[in-house]
Amino acid sequence: MIHPLTDRHNRTIDYLRISVTDRCNLRCGYCVPPTPFTHMKHKEILSYEELLRVVKVAVSLGIKKVRLTGGEPFARKGLIPFMEQLSCLDGLEDISVTTNGTLISDKIDVLKKAGLTRINISLDTLRPERFVQITKEDRFEDVIKTLHNAIDAGLAPVKLNTVLLDGINGDELEDFARLTLKHPIHVRFIEYMPIGEGTGPAKSELLAPAILKRLEKLGELTPVTRDAHDGPARRFKLKGALGEIGLISPMSNHFCATCNRIRLSADGHLRPCLLSDTKVSLKEPLRKGADEAAIEQLFRHAASIKGERHNLLDHHVHDMMCAIGG
Ligand code: SAM
């Protein structure tokens, strides 16, 4: 019988997000620090064998969903065979990925066969020239191909993640929202979070209340009833739209009371909260021979120190987003 992973605030943790690498082929200003930094060495990140062991224990504790993220998860070789291994685990119901979509436009069918159930694609602009300014790479068309191929492959719902910043892409809010009229996608506006050294308060972030006001001017906007697969997004639908709009508001209206997540960073730390530097090393005990029971205890300890809510408004998170896994 499974004794589920719970925390001190009566939340059940059934969702594990794994950052498989801190490397990314894009360099978005709000995510990657502006000053040069040293990437983790290969031996510092958990091997796929280590990750698989950890996930097996997590699943035995009731983890039902795993999301692979990074860095750019597809920048790490061997991710697809790893997904295949994950898909063989009894009890793991959902394997998803958050990606910038630049490296997989021709791999969607292979990914589906490997067990991928859902995909979130990050895209902050619908303008090719602006894409280069934001990401420092000319890969817009690749992302669009990935988006269309994911829709065609039925990886429903394909989610598009967008961070809006005034003076950078804030003027595209309406264009992103209108995409949902014609395409069966979920466009999700995520509030900027000050995470990582060098990425201070943006001052130009667009928060959910302001976004909502602008969305309401686009036409009739109906709230969508939450379902079991809902994450923290508050969901809306424009009249006649094929898709939906989601607002994810960690800053203006946190959703910590319903948080069901735990994270594993690229360097092998369990992090009970994205927006806190509290972490528990898993790599060290793993490499010193920890058995399954010891790994289970580390998960239980990490869950037990999960804060009731994040305090990002008072504290800065020092570790980088790409290492923790957004
Ligand atoms: N490379 C992958 C991607 O682009 O989706 C996965 C990693 S990325 C860190 C995951 C998500 O975090 C992206 O949607 C990105 O926009 C978001 N993100 C990065 N830095 C952020 C920040 N400071 N505030 C809010 N979201 C952020």
Image (tube, grey):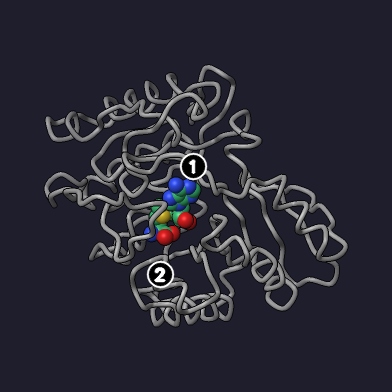
Q: Secondary structure at mark 1?
A: loop
Where does residue 99 sit, x and y in percent of width and height?
A: 42, 63
Would the CB of label 1 be found within 8 Å of ligand 1? yes
Q: Is residue 237 left or right of residue 324?
A: right
**Residue ID for mark 2:** 133
The answer to whether residue 91 shows anywhere in this view is no
- Image height of 265 relative to 280, above or below: below
Q: Residues within 10 Å of mark 2 (few under 14, many from 20)?
A: some
- Image height of 197 relative to 211, above or below: above
**Residue ID for mark 1:** 193
Mark 2 or mark 1: name the one nearer the start of the chain.
Answer: 2
Q: Which of the pair 185/111 is nearer the observer?
A: 185
Q: Is residue 1 left or right of residue 178?
A: left
Where does residue 49 sit, x and y in percent of width and height?
A: 21, 50
Q: Secondary structure at mark 2?
A: helix
Question: The residue under label 1 is which amino acid type?
Answer: Met
Disc ID at residue 182:
none
Q: Quadrant of residue 177?
A: bottom right
Q: Are marks 2 and 1 in contact (CB under 8 Å)?
A: no
Q: CA distance from mark 2 to mark 1?
A: 20 Å
Residue located at (34% from left, 49% from top): 322
The answer to whether residue 195 shows anywhere in this view is yes
Q: Nearer the viewer, mark 2 or mark 1?
A: 2
Residue located at (54% from left, 59% from top): 167
Where does residue 324 sit, x and y in percent of width and height?
A: 35, 42
